[in-house]
Every structure is written in C-alpha cells, then in structure tokens.
Amino acid sequence: MKKNKIEKIDVIELTQHQPSEFNPKLKYYEIFGDNGLMNGRMVCGSKSTYKNKYPDHMVIFNANIVIRSKGKIWCGDLDIDIDGDKLYKISKELGEHLYVLHEMDCRFGNEEDDINELIKRAMWSTDPDFKPNPPSGVWTFGKDGKSKRV
C-alpha cells in the first residue's frame, strides 16, 4: 500500500485588510441568504452535469446581481427557472429591481462601471419593462409577476 506524502505548507499571515468587492456588513447578504441564495453559491459541482440535467432551464453560472442604488450586491450560480420567484421576492423586499449579469460583465474591475452600463449588460431582470440585449432567449418577469421568456 502506497502512503500519501504530506508536504509542509507555508502559511502567509495577512497584516492588513485585503480588498474585496463586497462589504459583509451590508443587509443584502442576509436578505439573499434568508431566501436560500447564499452569496457565492453553486447549484452543482459540475456545470455540464447541471446543464444536461436541466437543458431547458435558464442557468447563469457565476452570475452577478446589481441594483440601481448600490451596484453589485450578490454573486453566485442562478437557475432562473428555480430561483426566479425568490429573486422577485427579494426585489419586492428591497423595493427595487434586480439585474442579473454574466460573470465577466460585472467582475475583475467591471463592477465599478456606471450602473446604467451594467444594466445594459444584464441578461435578466425583475423589471417587467427591461429589454435585454440581445433580446431573444432571455427571461424576465411580466407585470403579473410570472417569469416568461422574452
């Protein structure tokens, strides 16, 4: 039987606060968490397995959510078919619409872009008047509060 060799790992001690795109004191963590959407959540360990299991679902891996008043407030995996009602509930609780963007549209420095530019990049929203770009194959909520493909 072969034994696994454990190597020594150097531990680096951080002496100052490291930059982060989120402030953990904000209420958004709690609101999303209370609705079953923990920040950074994964819907599955394998993206391809999840896509194969739910081929007709609108799934956004590493999604980002922005709101007009604060910009980026959440990131993680979303399945709009499953999570859409939760997002609509959160939107009502916050009193403003949520806009969902792909990972690269709101990370790695892009999260500081003007909010109007971020919203233009969104692929889904709780805003019934939202017009996604590109406009086809994207989901949104209608005025009746039901999700629908645009």
Image (cartoon, rainbow, N blue to C red):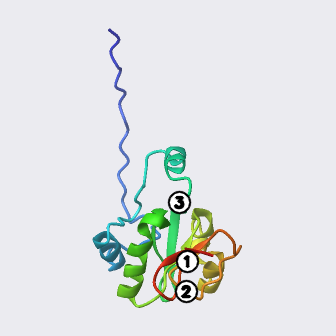
Give the mark nearer the N terminus: 3 vs 1: 3
Mark 3–mark 1 Cα distance, whole angstroms, equals 13 Å
The percent coordinates of residue 1 (x first, y second) are 32, 8
Name the foreground residue: 129 vs 96: 129
Which disc number belongs to residue 128? Answer: 2
The percent coordinates of residue 74 (x first, y second) are 44, 71
Which disc number belongs to residue 57? Answer: 3
Density class for disc 2 (Cα within 10 Å; few <14, some 14-19, many ≥20) is some
User: Secondary structure under badge 3?
Assistant: loop
Residue type for callout 2: Pro
The percent coordinates of residue 89 (x first, y second) are 37, 80
User: Secondary structure under badge 2?
Assistant: loop
Quarter of the figure with residue 148: bottom right
Query: Taking 74 as reference, is 119 above or below it?
Result: below
Which disc number belongs to residue 23? Answer: none
Q: Is residue 125 left or right of residue 23?
A: right
Q: Could you tell me which residue is drawn at 54 percent across and 50 percent down?
A: 51
Give the mark nearer the N terminus: 1 vs 2: 2
Residue type for callout 3: His
Residue contact between numbered discs 3 and 1, judged by CB atoms under 8 Å: no
Quarter of the figure with residue 100: bottom right
Density class for disc 3 (Cα within 10 Å; few <14, some 14-19, many ≥20) is some
Q: Could you tell me which residue is drawn at 35 percent across and 19 percent down?
A: 4
